[in-house]
Image: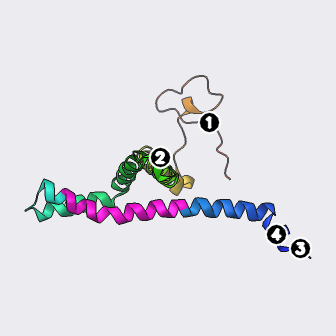
């Protein structure tokens, strides 16, 4: 029967401990972004348009988007990175987590912009693949010349 010491030294336990630590830092970063969002909206709206309630809503709506969240995480990371080293390792570790979050979120947004149209085209063509028109003869494998306009194709299309 394994002892407690054996279980604590098991590779799975060590992996779980490491993953739990990473998850705790990630959670701390996410919570810091959520906690600072509303006060930041209040400060920005007070200074940019004190009498304009619609500006407050626009700022809040932007900071609630993925891009706004990534921007806020990046700003918090900069602020935490500027803290003196005498505060310990926690601000630097949290700053790193927020930097990684901001980069990943913005990278995901850019990938969505680039890949979104491609996903739509793929879905469109895969939706009705059975009734899709055959490719032009000049695009088929082994074709060396194109057929004259109006000439019927002389090939079999595999069904499968």
**Other-residue count near label 1 (Cα within 10 Å), few / some / many at <14 / 14–19 / ≥20:** few
Q: Number of callouts in the render? A: 4
Q: Which residues are magenta?
A: 25-44
For disc 3, the marked residue is 2
Residue furthest to the front in view is: 86
CB under 8 Å between callouts 4 and 1? no
Please tell me the numbered disc located at residue 85.
2
Residue furthest to the right in view is: 1
For disc 1, the marked residue is 154
Using the rendered image of the protein, determine whether residue 104 is visible from the camera's viewpoint.
Answer: no
How far, Cα to Cα, is label 2 from label 3? 43 Å
* Circle nearer the N terminus (4, 2): 4
In front of the other: 52 or 152: 52
Residue furthest to the left in view is: 51
Horizontal arrangement in the rendering, residue 151 relative to residue 53 (left or right): right
Task: Provide residue 5's location: percent of width, then percent of height.
Answer: 83, 69
Using the rendered image of the protein, determine whether residue 89 is visible from the camera's viewpoint.
Answer: yes
Horizontal arrangement in the rendering, residue 133 relative to residue 17 (left or right): left
Q: Disc 1 on helix, strand or loop?
A: loop
Horizontal arrangement in the rendering, residue 38 relative to residue 148 (left or right): left
State whether residue 97 is above or below residue 53: above
Please tell me the numbered disc located at residue 7.
4
**Other-residue count near label 2 (Cα within 10 Å), few / some / many at <14 / 14–19 / ≥20:** few
């Amino acid at each position: 029967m394994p002892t407690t010491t054996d279980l604590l030294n098991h590779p799975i336990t060590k992996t779980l401990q490491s993953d739990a630590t990473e998850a705790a830092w990630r959670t701390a970063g996410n919570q810091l972004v959520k906690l600072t969002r509303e006060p930041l909206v209040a400060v920005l709206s007070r200074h940019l348009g004190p009498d304009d309630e619609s500006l407050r809503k626009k700022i809040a709506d932007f900071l609630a988007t993925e891009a706004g969240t990534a921007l806020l995480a990046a700003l918090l990371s900069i602020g935490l990175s500027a803290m003196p080293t005498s505060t310990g390792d926690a601000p630097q570790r949290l700053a790193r987590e927020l930097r990684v979050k901001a980069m990943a979120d913005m990278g995901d947004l850019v990938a969505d912009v680039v890949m979104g149209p491609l996903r739509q085209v793929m879905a469109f063509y895969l939706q009705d693949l059975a009734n899709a028109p055959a490719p032009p003869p000049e695009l088929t494998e082994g074709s060396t010349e194109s057929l004259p306009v109006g000439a019927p194709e002389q090939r079999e299309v595999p069904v499968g």
